[in-house]
Image (cartoon, rainbow, N blue to C red):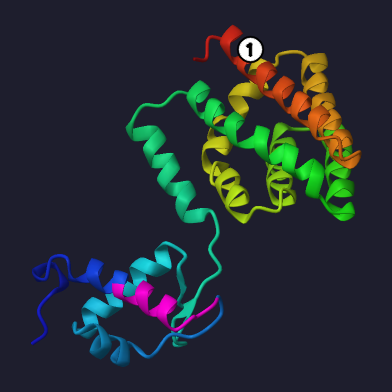
């Protein structure tokens, strides 16, 4: 009888590392299939239950894609796993919203400058379109506006041309959805909320003009405003 995985401590982690080494050694790219579970178990020198556990672990991390009865395939990584880690780290270490904003500011001051230099015409046009939709959404509930805001910052990171920046910025989406309403309530007046969207518009306009200095100044203004509004509301 096969022993339960819990009786073989460390083997699943070792198998996960072995599968990652195999992916690199064979030059596998996103979408490429891995060998069968049986072949992997033989290659790694572990049982099939351990191999199965390793495959599931890598799928959770979005390193592999496992669907139905298909062979496991190399996945195109996204920010979902990292987002969960950041959310847990923020909660478990008792980090404040202001600390999260400080990290985001560091990242996004760089991405906005790169986006101004590297953006495509389509990306620049979409950023301006998002700001127009944000003005329209201001008259309704805040949920649509929140999603547009998240998309705005995500698109800037994508336009930077650096996939790692894009993944890092996107990894804040869980935290942002949990805290966005606090900032919304802190901007208590319609004019204050409208001014916030105008700042987004200035960022988008600077990116369209490929003016990195102006884009960075507008992004700095955006984060200064966010920090100030939250502090006045007693959010530290």
Q: Locate residue 101: give its quadrant.
A: top right
Q: Quadrant of the N terminus?
A: bottom left
Total numbered labels? 1
**28 in the magenta segment:** yes
- The percent coordinates of residue 236 (x first, y second) are 49, 15
* Foreground residue among 108 and 151: 108
Q: Which residues are magenta?
A: 18-29
Q: Is residue 227 above or below residue 60?
A: above
Q: Is residue 52 above or below residue 216?
A: below
Q: Is residue 224 left or right of residue 11?
A: right
* Other-residue count near label 1 (Cα within 10 Å), few / some / many at <14 / 14–19 / ≥20: some
Q: Is residue 164 left or right of residue 236?
A: right
Question: Looking at the image, which residue is at 67% across and 32% down?
Answer: 109
- The percent coordinates of residue 129 (x first, y second) are 88, 44
- The percent coordinates of residue 37 (x first, y second) are 33, 87
Question: Looking at the image, which residue is at 43% across and 85% down?
Answer: 34
Q: Is residue 88 above or below residue 29?
A: above
Question: Looking at the image, which residue is at 59% across and 15% down?
Answer: 230
Question: Looking at the image, which residue is at 53% across and 42% down?
Answer: 174
* Location of mark 1 (residue): 228
* Foreground residue among 44 and 61: 44
């Amino acid at each position: 009888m096969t022993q339960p995985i819990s009786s073989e401590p460390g083997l699943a982690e070792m198998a996960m590392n072995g599968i990652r080494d195999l992916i690199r050694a064979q030059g596998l790219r996103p979408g490429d299939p891995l060998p069968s579970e049986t072949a992997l178990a033989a290659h790694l020198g572990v049982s099939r239950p351990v191999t199965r556990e390793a495959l599931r672990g890598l799928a959770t991390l979005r390193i592999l894609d496992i669907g139905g009865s298909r062979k496991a395939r190399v996945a195109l990584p996204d920010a979902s796993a990292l987002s969960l880690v950041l959310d847990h780290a923020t909660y478990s270490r008792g980090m404040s919203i202001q600390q999260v904003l400080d990290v985001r500011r560091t990242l996004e001051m760089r991405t906005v400058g790169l986006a101004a230099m590297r953006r495509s015409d389509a990306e620049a046009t979409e950023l301006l379109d998002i700001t127009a939709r944000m003005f329209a959404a201001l008259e309704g509930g805040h949920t649509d506006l929140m999603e547009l805001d998240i998309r705005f910052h995500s698109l800037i990171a994508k336009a930077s041309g650096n996939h790692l920046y894009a993944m890092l910025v996107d990894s804040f989406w869980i935290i942002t959805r949990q805290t966005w309403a606090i900032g919304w309530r802190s901007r208590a007046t319609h004019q204050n909320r409208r001014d916030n969207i105008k700042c987004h518009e200035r960022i988008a306009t600077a990116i369209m003009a490929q003016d990195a200095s102006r884009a960075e100044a507008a992004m700095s203004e955006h984060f200064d405003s966010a920090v100030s509004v939250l502090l006045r509301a007693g959010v530290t």
